Image (spheres, rainbow, N blue to C red):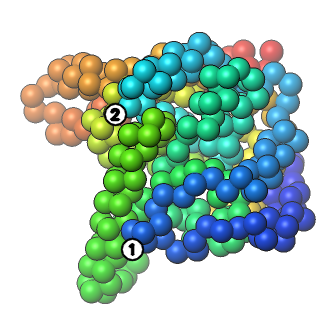
Amino acid sequence: MGKLLKDAYGKYFKEMLQYSKAPAKIDSTNVYQEANKDLTKYMEMLISDNILPGSGLGNVENFKEFYDAVKAGKRGLILMEHYTNLDLPEIIYFLKIHGEDWSKEFSEKIVAVAGMKLNEAGADIRVWTEGFTRVVIYPTRSLDKVGASGASEEEKIAEEKKARAINLAAMRAMDDCKKRGQVVLVFPSGTRYRPGHPETKKGLREIDSYLRLFDIVLPVAINGNCLRINPDNPEDMVSDIVEQDKVLLTASKMLDCKAYRKQVLDSLPADEPDPKQKTIDGIMDILAKLHDEVEKTRLN
Protein backbone atom coordinates (compact mmCIF):
# COMPACT_ATOMS: atom_id res chain seq x y z
CA MET A 1 0.00 0.00 0.00
CA GLY A 2 1.22 3.50 -0.83
CA LYS A 3 1.41 6.52 1.44
CA LEU A 4 -1.29 9.03 2.27
CA LEU A 5 -0.92 12.25 0.27
CA LYS A 6 -0.57 14.28 3.48
CA ASP A 7 2.21 11.97 4.70
CA ALA A 8 4.10 11.74 1.43
CA TYR A 9 3.90 15.41 0.40
CA GLY A 10 2.62 17.26 3.45
CA LYS A 11 6.15 18.53 4.04
CA TYR A 12 5.57 20.99 1.19
CA PHE A 13 2.34 22.40 2.59
CA LYS A 14 3.76 25.43 4.42
CA GLU A 15 5.89 26.27 1.43
CA MET A 16 2.90 26.01 -0.92
CA LEU A 17 0.69 28.03 1.39
CA GLN A 18 3.04 31.01 0.98
CA TYR A 19 2.18 31.11 -2.73
CA SER A 20 -1.56 30.54 -2.35
CA LYS A 21 -3.90 33.24 -3.69
CA ALA A 22 -7.14 31.42 -4.49
CA PRO A 23 -10.29 32.42 -2.56
CA ALA A 24 -11.52 30.17 0.23
CA LYS A 25 -15.14 31.01 -0.58
CA ILE A 26 -16.73 31.05 -4.02
CA ASP A 27 -19.25 33.62 -5.19
CA SER A 28 -20.30 35.01 -8.55
CA THR A 29 -17.31 37.38 -8.69
CA ASN A 30 -14.48 34.82 -8.54
CA VAL A 31 -15.57 31.77 -10.55
CA TYR A 32 -12.78 32.14 -13.13
CA GLN A 33 -9.40 31.34 -11.58
CA GLU A 34 -6.18 31.48 -13.54
CA ALA A 35 -3.50 28.91 -12.82
CA ASN A 36 -1.11 29.89 -10.06
CA LYS A 37 2.15 28.91 -11.75
CA ASP A 38 4.03 29.03 -8.45
CA LEU A 39 2.00 26.00 -7.34
CA THR A 40 1.83 24.03 -10.60
CA LYS A 41 5.32 22.66 -10.06
CA TYR A 42 4.31 20.78 -6.91
CA MET A 43 1.60 18.79 -8.67
CA GLU A 44 3.98 18.12 -11.56
CA MET A 45 6.49 16.81 -9.04
CA LEU A 46 3.86 14.46 -7.57
CA ILE A 47 3.10 13.14 -11.06
CA SER A 48 6.71 12.73 -12.17
CA ASP A 49 7.59 10.97 -8.90
CA ASN A 50 4.90 8.34 -9.34
CA ILE A 51 4.20 7.61 -13.01
CA LEU A 52 5.92 4.52 -14.34
CA PRO A 53 7.72 4.22 -17.70
CA GLY A 54 5.34 4.08 -20.64
CA SER A 55 2.94 6.62 -19.12
CA GLY A 56 1.62 9.37 -21.35
CA LEU A 57 -0.87 10.10 -24.13
CA GLY A 58 -2.59 7.47 -26.24
CA ASN A 59 -3.82 8.18 -29.78
CA VAL A 60 -1.78 11.37 -29.91
CA GLU A 61 -3.04 12.04 -33.42
CA ASN A 62 -6.57 12.48 -32.03
CA PHE A 63 -5.38 15.10 -29.54
CA LYS A 64 -3.64 16.97 -32.37
CA GLU A 65 -6.59 16.77 -34.76
CA PHE A 66 -8.84 18.19 -32.05
CA TYR A 67 -6.47 21.03 -31.18
CA ASP A 68 -5.93 21.90 -34.84
CA ALA A 69 -9.70 22.27 -35.16
CA VAL A 70 -9.79 24.53 -32.09
CA LYS A 71 -7.04 26.69 -33.57
CA ALA A 72 -9.09 26.90 -36.76
CA GLY A 73 -11.97 28.41 -34.77
CA LYS A 74 -13.99 25.48 -33.43
CA ARG A 75 -15.25 25.68 -29.85
CA GLY A 76 -13.66 22.68 -28.16
CA LEU A 77 -14.83 20.57 -25.21
CA ILE A 78 -12.98 17.68 -23.54
CA LEU A 79 -15.09 15.09 -21.70
CA MET A 80 -12.80 12.91 -19.59
CA GLU A 81 -13.14 10.01 -17.19
CA HIS A 82 -12.58 10.92 -13.55
CA TYR A 83 -10.77 8.73 -11.03
CA THR A 84 -8.46 11.05 -9.13
CA ASN A 85 -7.55 14.65 -8.40
CA LEU A 86 -4.54 14.05 -10.65
CA ASP A 87 -6.68 13.66 -13.78
CA LEU A 88 -6.60 17.34 -14.73
CA PRO A 89 -2.91 17.85 -13.88
CA GLU A 90 -1.98 14.71 -15.81
CA ILE A 91 -3.53 15.71 -19.13
CA ILE A 92 -1.80 19.09 -18.90
CA TYR A 93 1.49 17.50 -17.83
CA PHE A 94 1.45 14.81 -20.53
CA LEU A 95 0.67 17.35 -23.25
CA LYS A 96 3.46 19.55 -21.97
CA ILE A 97 6.12 16.83 -21.86
CA HIS A 98 5.04 15.42 -25.23
CA GLY A 99 7.32 18.16 -26.39
CA GLU A 100 5.84 19.38 -29.66
CA ASP A 101 4.87 23.01 -30.15
CA TRP A 102 1.18 22.20 -30.63
CA SER A 103 1.02 20.01 -27.50
CA LYS A 104 2.72 22.60 -25.29
CA GLU A 105 0.32 25.23 -26.58
CA PHE A 106 -2.63 22.89 -26.04
CA SER A 107 -1.53 22.29 -22.43
CA GLU A 108 -1.77 26.02 -21.73
CA LYS A 109 -5.26 26.35 -23.21
CA ILE A 110 -7.13 23.91 -20.95
CA VAL A 111 -9.65 25.31 -18.50
CA ALA A 112 -11.35 22.79 -16.21
CA VAL A 113 -14.84 23.05 -14.82
CA ALA A 114 -14.43 22.34 -11.11
CA GLY A 115 -16.72 22.13 -8.11
CA MET A 116 -16.57 24.59 -5.22
CA LYS A 117 -15.31 21.91 -2.84
CA LEU A 118 -11.78 22.13 -4.22
CA ASN A 119 -11.60 25.74 -3.04
CA GLU A 120 -13.70 25.49 0.09
CA ALA A 121 -12.63 22.14 1.61
CA GLY A 122 -9.56 23.73 3.18
CA ALA A 123 -6.19 25.25 2.36
CA ASP A 124 -4.52 21.83 2.25
CA ILE A 125 -6.67 20.94 -0.79
CA ARG A 126 -6.80 24.41 -2.31
CA VAL A 127 -3.04 24.74 -2.70
CA TRP A 128 -2.93 21.59 -4.85
CA THR A 129 -5.88 22.77 -6.93
CA GLU A 130 -4.98 26.33 -7.79
CA GLY A 131 -2.01 25.42 -9.96
CA PHE A 132 -4.49 24.91 -12.83
CA THR A 133 -6.93 27.25 -14.56
CA ARG A 134 -10.55 26.57 -13.58
CA VAL A 135 -14.11 27.79 -13.90
CA VAL A 136 -15.79 26.99 -10.60
CA ILE A 137 -19.43 25.87 -10.43
CA TYR A 138 -21.95 25.01 -7.75
CA PRO A 139 -22.57 21.30 -8.53
CA THR A 140 -26.09 19.91 -8.63
CA ARG A 141 -25.04 17.14 -6.25
CA SER A 142 -23.99 19.72 -3.65
CA LEU A 143 -27.33 21.48 -3.89
CA ASP A 144 -29.14 18.14 -3.52
CA LYS A 145 -27.19 17.52 -0.30
CA VAL A 146 -28.40 20.85 1.09
CA GLY A 147 -31.97 19.81 0.31
CA ALA A 148 -31.50 16.55 2.18
CA SER A 149 -29.66 18.06 5.13
CA GLY A 150 -32.65 19.21 7.13
CA ALA A 151 -32.06 22.87 6.30
CA SER A 152 -34.99 25.23 6.70
CA GLU A 153 -37.00 26.31 3.67
CA GLU A 154 -35.49 29.78 3.96
CA GLU A 155 -31.96 28.34 3.98
CA LYS A 156 -32.73 26.17 0.96
CA ILE A 157 -34.04 29.15 -1.00
CA ALA A 158 -30.96 31.20 -0.12
CA GLU A 159 -28.66 28.36 -1.20
CA GLU A 160 -30.54 27.90 -4.48
CA LYS A 161 -30.18 31.62 -5.17
CA LYS A 162 -26.45 31.41 -4.46
CA ALA A 163 -26.10 28.38 -6.76
CA ARG A 164 -27.91 30.15 -9.60
CA ALA A 165 -25.71 33.23 -9.30
CA ILE A 166 -22.49 31.20 -9.27
CA ASN A 167 -23.49 28.97 -12.18
CA LEU A 168 -24.70 31.91 -14.28
CA ALA A 169 -21.34 33.60 -13.73
CA ALA A 170 -19.60 30.33 -14.61
CA MET A 171 -21.50 30.08 -17.91
CA ARG A 172 -20.44 33.62 -18.78
CA ALA A 173 -16.85 32.78 -17.89
CA MET A 174 -16.95 29.69 -20.12
CA ASP A 175 -18.30 31.79 -22.96
CA ASP A 176 -15.32 34.11 -22.52
CA CYS A 177 -13.01 31.07 -22.56
CA LYS A 178 -14.46 29.92 -25.87
CA LYS A 179 -14.00 33.38 -27.38
CA ARG A 180 -10.32 33.31 -26.31
CA GLY A 181 -9.79 29.94 -27.98
CA GLN A 182 -9.40 28.06 -24.70
CA VAL A 183 -10.48 24.43 -24.36
CA VAL A 184 -12.99 23.60 -21.63
CA LEU A 185 -12.54 20.28 -19.83
CA VAL A 186 -15.45 18.69 -17.98
CA PHE A 187 -15.66 15.48 -15.98
CA PRO A 188 -19.07 14.21 -17.15
CA SER A 189 -19.63 12.04 -14.07
CA GLY A 190 -19.28 15.14 -11.89
CA THR A 191 -17.36 13.17 -9.27
CA ARG A 192 -14.49 10.72 -8.96
CA TYR A 193 -15.34 7.08 -9.63
CA ARG A 194 -15.48 4.97 -6.50
CA PRO A 195 -15.17 1.19 -6.91
CA GLY A 196 -18.34 -0.52 -5.82
CA HIS A 197 -20.41 2.62 -6.47
CA PRO A 198 -21.44 2.47 -10.14
CA GLU A 199 -23.56 5.62 -9.75
CA THR A 200 -20.31 7.62 -9.51
CA LYS A 201 -19.49 6.65 -13.10
CA LYS A 202 -22.85 7.67 -14.52
CA GLY A 203 -22.83 10.75 -16.73
CA LEU A 204 -24.83 13.77 -15.56
CA ARG A 205 -27.74 14.81 -17.76
CA GLU A 206 -26.55 18.43 -17.47
CA ILE A 207 -23.68 17.53 -19.80
CA ASP A 208 -26.14 17.70 -22.67
CA SER A 209 -26.08 21.48 -22.19
CA TYR A 210 -22.33 21.51 -22.79
CA LEU A 211 -22.75 19.49 -25.97
CA ARG A 212 -25.16 22.15 -27.22
CA LEU A 213 -22.73 24.98 -26.42
CA PHE A 214 -19.64 23.56 -28.15
CA ASP A 215 -18.76 22.57 -31.71
CA ILE A 216 -16.51 19.57 -31.10
CA VAL A 217 -15.92 17.18 -28.22
CA LEU A 218 -12.91 15.00 -27.45
CA PRO A 219 -13.65 11.96 -25.21
CA VAL A 220 -10.59 10.98 -23.15
CA ALA A 221 -10.25 7.72 -21.20
CA ILE A 222 -7.92 7.29 -18.23
CA ASN A 223 -6.13 4.05 -17.36
CA GLY A 224 -3.92 3.80 -14.30
CA ASN A 225 -4.04 5.91 -11.21
CA CYS A 226 -1.32 7.35 -8.96
CA LEU A 227 -3.65 8.96 -6.44
CA ARG A 228 -6.41 6.71 -5.16
CA ILE A 229 -9.42 7.42 -2.99
CA ASN A 230 -8.84 6.12 0.51
CA PRO A 231 -11.69 3.68 1.25
CA ASP A 232 -11.28 4.33 4.97
CA ASN A 233 -11.59 8.10 4.57
CA PRO A 234 -13.09 8.85 1.14
CA GLU A 235 -14.16 12.43 1.89
CA ASP A 236 -10.73 13.61 3.02
CA MET A 237 -8.79 14.30 -0.16
CA VAL A 238 -5.43 14.73 1.58
CA SER A 239 -5.88 11.16 2.80
CA ASP A 240 -5.89 9.91 -0.80
CA ILE A 241 -3.30 7.17 -1.33
CA VAL A 242 -0.25 7.84 -3.50
CA GLU A 243 0.78 4.82 -5.59
CA GLN A 244 3.15 4.34 -8.50
CA ASP A 245 1.40 3.26 -11.69
CA LYS A 246 1.54 3.36 -15.47
CA VAL A 247 -0.95 6.03 -16.50
CA LEU A 248 -2.36 6.40 -20.00
CA LEU A 249 -4.70 9.14 -21.19
CA THR A 250 -6.21 8.01 -24.48
CA ALA A 251 -8.28 10.14 -26.83
CA SER A 252 -11.09 8.88 -29.00
CA LYS A 253 -11.77 10.52 -32.35
CA MET A 254 -13.34 13.92 -31.82
CA LEU A 255 -17.07 14.21 -32.41
CA ASP A 256 -19.07 17.00 -34.00
CA CYS A 257 -21.39 17.94 -31.13
CA LYS A 258 -24.39 18.88 -33.25
CA ALA A 259 -24.16 15.79 -35.46
CA TYR A 260 -23.59 13.51 -32.47
CA ARG A 261 -26.61 14.83 -30.58
CA LYS A 262 -28.79 14.55 -33.67
CA GLN A 263 -27.71 10.96 -34.23
CA VAL A 264 -28.54 9.98 -30.65
CA LEU A 265 -31.83 11.89 -30.49
CA ASP A 266 -32.99 10.57 -33.86
CA SER A 267 -32.43 7.01 -32.64
CA LEU A 268 -34.72 7.40 -29.62
CA PRO A 269 -38.38 6.44 -29.50
CA ALA A 270 -40.87 9.30 -29.45
CA ASP A 271 -41.84 8.49 -25.87
CA GLU A 272 -38.25 8.49 -24.49
CA PRO A 273 -38.67 10.13 -21.06
CA ASP A 274 -35.15 11.62 -20.77
CA PRO A 275 -33.42 12.24 -24.11
CA LYS A 276 -30.80 14.50 -22.51
CA GLN A 277 -29.58 11.61 -20.37
CA LYS A 278 -29.24 9.45 -23.47
CA THR A 279 -26.83 11.88 -25.12
CA ILE A 280 -24.40 11.69 -22.22
CA ASP A 281 -24.96 7.95 -21.81
CA GLY A 282 -23.57 7.62 -25.34
CA ILE A 283 -20.43 9.54 -24.40
CA MET A 284 -19.96 7.41 -21.30
CA ASP A 285 -20.26 4.28 -23.46
CA ILE A 286 -17.51 5.60 -25.75
CA LEU A 287 -15.29 6.25 -22.74
CA ALA A 288 -15.99 2.83 -21.18
CA LYS A 289 -15.20 0.95 -24.39
CA LEU A 290 -11.99 2.91 -24.93
CA HIS A 291 -10.96 2.38 -21.31
CA ASP A 292 -11.52 -1.38 -21.52
CA GLU A 293 -9.63 -1.64 -24.80
CA VAL A 294 -6.59 0.19 -23.40
CA GLU A 295 -6.61 -1.76 -20.14
CA LYS A 296 -6.16 -5.05 -21.99
CA THR A 297 -2.57 -4.10 -22.94
CA ARG A 298 -1.67 -1.30 -20.51
CA LEU A 299 0.65 -3.35 -18.29
CA ASN A 300 2.19 -5.51 -21.02
**Residue 250: x %, y % from top left:** 61, 23
Q: Amino acid at mark 2?
A: Phe
Reply above or below: 112 against 248.
below
Reply above or below: 32 against 52.
below
**Residue 145: x %, y % from top left:** 41, 69
| Circle on res. 214 | 2
Return the residue at label 1: 146
The local crowd at label 1, few if under 14, some if 14 to 19, many if 20 or more residues have their Cα within 10 Å, is some
Q: Residue at x 43, y 59 (%)?
A: 137
Which corner quadrant of the image does residue 11 belong to?
bottom right
**Residue 4: x %, y % from top left:** 82, 58
Dot 1 or dot 2: first in sequence order is 1
Quadrant where the image shows the C terminus: top right
| Circle on res. 196 | none
Q: Give the SS element for disc 2.
A: loop
Q: Residue at x 40, y 53 (%)?
A: 173
**Is residue 297 or residue 78 the one in the foreground?**
78
Which corner quadrant of the image does residue 247 belong to?
top right
Question: In the drawing, does residue 46 fall left or right of residue 40?
Answer: right
